Image: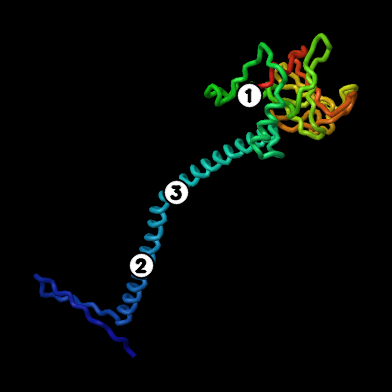
Amino acid sequence: MKGKYYTIQIIPEHSEKVKQFKVRTWWFGAIKLLLVLFILVLGLFIYHLGKINRIVANYEKMRVTNAQLIKKDNNYEEMFSRLDSLWVLEERIQNIFETFLENDSGKINSIIDKNKFAHTPVEKIQVDYEGLHGWQPMSEKIRLEHLPSILPVVGIESKKFSEEEKHPGVDISAQAGSPVFATGAGNVIFAGSKDELGNTIIIDHQNGYKSSYSHLKTMNVRKGYSVGKGDIIGTVGSTGKSSSAHLHFEITKDGVHQDPAQFINY
């Protein structure tokens, strides 16, 4: 059985010779099929090319958005850091003024007034905290942080510093169990029993100054600990040779005893 054909004639304009070609009918079917497949493949290619173009176009937006998010995250971290600093400062102030026990402003003012030393020395070390006389460089802030210049306990001075009476510190009477604060940042170089002084903590402030806290009931730090200014290091007691609960507080500079009243900034 012979197949069907299509006859294609080509008639030149200036020639009498006619060219004829016979094409089987199934070739046309194959050409149609290939054309359809080509169109489908071309459509898929154009579709995926459009998706790629959209991704590329959105990349720049995503990059900018990501940079903005990173900047916001850094801002949030800075804000949280400032909040942490404020929280630490508030906690130290509360510890110093015993506001963790009392919220009444009248009682707080009374505590402050009654716990000042009974005299004002002729010469006092000038402590210039940030906010009092303007901006301070970091080196000055570090210096002030390590200077033993705050009250070590809320109480009443019962005995002053006296070279004549061989009393190398001050005694501050306070209720047993009251918190004792580090008067400056530094490292604990001694924490234990010290003969007549009882439980004693000594802090090296790494600037020639050392401060000691004696007759403690409890000690919250050990030798080798680093402490910050205002940290609670123990509680008031009556250990060693002592007739009542009080804190014996000393400050030395290069091994020479100093009058603590010259350092307390209140």
Taking depth in this image into account, of 127 and 51 the one nearest to the observer is 127
> Which residue is rendered at x = 62% and y = 16% of the image?
126
| Other-residue count near label 3 (Cα within 10 Å), few / some / many at <14 / 14–19 / ≥20 | few
Name the image colouring: rainbow
Task: Report the Cα–Cα distance between label 2 and label 3.
Answer: 33 Å
Q: Which residue is at a point 77% across and 26% down the rendered structure image?
A: 188
Residue topped by disc 3: 65
Q: Earlier in the sequence, mark 3 or mark 1?
A: 3
Q: Quadrant of residue 118?
A: top right
Amino acid identity at mark 2 = Gly
Please tell me whether mark 2 sits on a helix, a strand or a loop: helix
In depth, the one of 102 and 83 nearer the eye is 102
Mark 1 lies on residue: 142
- Under circle 3, the secondary element is helix
SS category of the residue bearing label 1: helix
Q: Is residue 246 left or right of residue 105?
A: right
Q: Is there a contact, CB below 8 Å, between mark 2 and mark 3? A: no
Q: Please, what is the three-letter code of the amino acid marked with disc 3?
A: Thr
Residue to which mark 2 is pinned: 43
Tell me which amino acid carries mark 1: Ile
Left or right: residue 157 versus residue 124 is right
Q: Residue 220's quadrant in the figure?
A: top right
**Where is residue 7 shown, x and y percent of the image?**
22, 81
For residue 189, say whether it is visible.
no
User: Which quadrant, please, contains the N terminus?
Assistant: bottom left
Mark nearest the camera among 3 and 1 is: 1
Q: Earlier in the sequence, mark 2 or mark 3?
A: 2
Residue 92: give x, y in percent of width and height.
67, 33
Answer with left or right where residue 57 lies relative to residue 183: left
